[in-house]
Amino acid sequence: MKTKTSNLIKYLLKNYPHKSELSASRLTKMLYLSDWKNAIENSKQLTDAEWHFNHYGPYVDNFIKIAKSDNDINVTSAQTVFGGHKQQIELSKNYNGSIDITEPEKKILDFVIESTKRKNYEDFIKLVYSTYPIVSSSRYSDLNLVKMASEYKIILEKSSNK
């Protein structure tokens, strides 16, 4: 099944330089960062996700379901460096299809890739947890990124006028 979100996932899978780091957790949080960045810049999310702040941070179950339902994406079980288990997500080995996203979407995803590719998992998680929706919300709450981006821009504006 090809959806806008599966195309966003494919773009990240194709262009992120450290393929072995693309677990379900990291991919989900990269999509969160993409939605957050787009909410700030364009007052809308890239995905139609309804974000929740659960015990693992910003989370949406649906991305992995979308990945599993797309024949061009493989989701496999792998072991973490600490001996735990993770879901590894990658493009099919012989995938050479087109990825249907717009230039503004590519710009947002490229920004997220560039901002995260040099971060180990711990530093990556610190970045995610430092975003306004997470620092200003309680665990187990819904995250309205568009509304929060509006609040965030007002806070930034007020602080720059001081």
Image: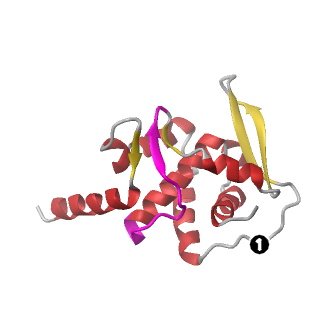
Choose top left, top right, bottom left or bottom right for residue 149. Answer: bottom left
In this view, 38 is above or below 32: below
Choose top left, top right, bottom left or bottom right for residue 121. Answer: top right
In this view, 57 is above or below 33: above
Residue drawn at (69%, 73%) of the image: 100
Of the pair 123 and 27, the residue shown nearer to us: 27
Badge 1 local density, few (<14 within 10 Å), some, or many (20+)?
A: few
User: Residue 59 placed where, x, y %?
Assistant: 52, 43
User: Residue 92 placed where, x, y %?
Assistant: 83, 54
Q: Which residue is mark 1?
A: 98
Quick one: which residue is furthest to the right in this view?
94
- The amino acid on which the numbered mark 1 sits, given as a three-letter code, is Ser
Q: Is residue 109 magenta?
A: no
Quick one: which residue is furthest to the left in this view?
162
Of the pair 90 and 69, the residue shown nearer to us: 69
Residue drawn at (26%, 59%) of the image: 151
Q: Quadrant of the N terminus?
A: bottom right
Left or right: 45 as drawn, with respect to 94: left
User: Residue 70 placed where, x, y %?
Assistant: 77, 56
Left or right: 22 as drawn, with respect to 155: right
Q: Is residue 48 magenta?
A: yes
Residue drawn at (67%, 46%) of the image: 22
For the rendered model, the colour scheme is secondary structure
Span highlighted in magenta in the image: 40-55
Helix, strand or loop for disc 1? loop
Choose top left, top right, bottom left or bottom right for residue 109. Answer: bottom right
Answer yes or no: is residue 43 visible: yes
Residue drawn at (68%, 65%) of the image: 3
Left or right: 46 as drawn, with respect to 139: right
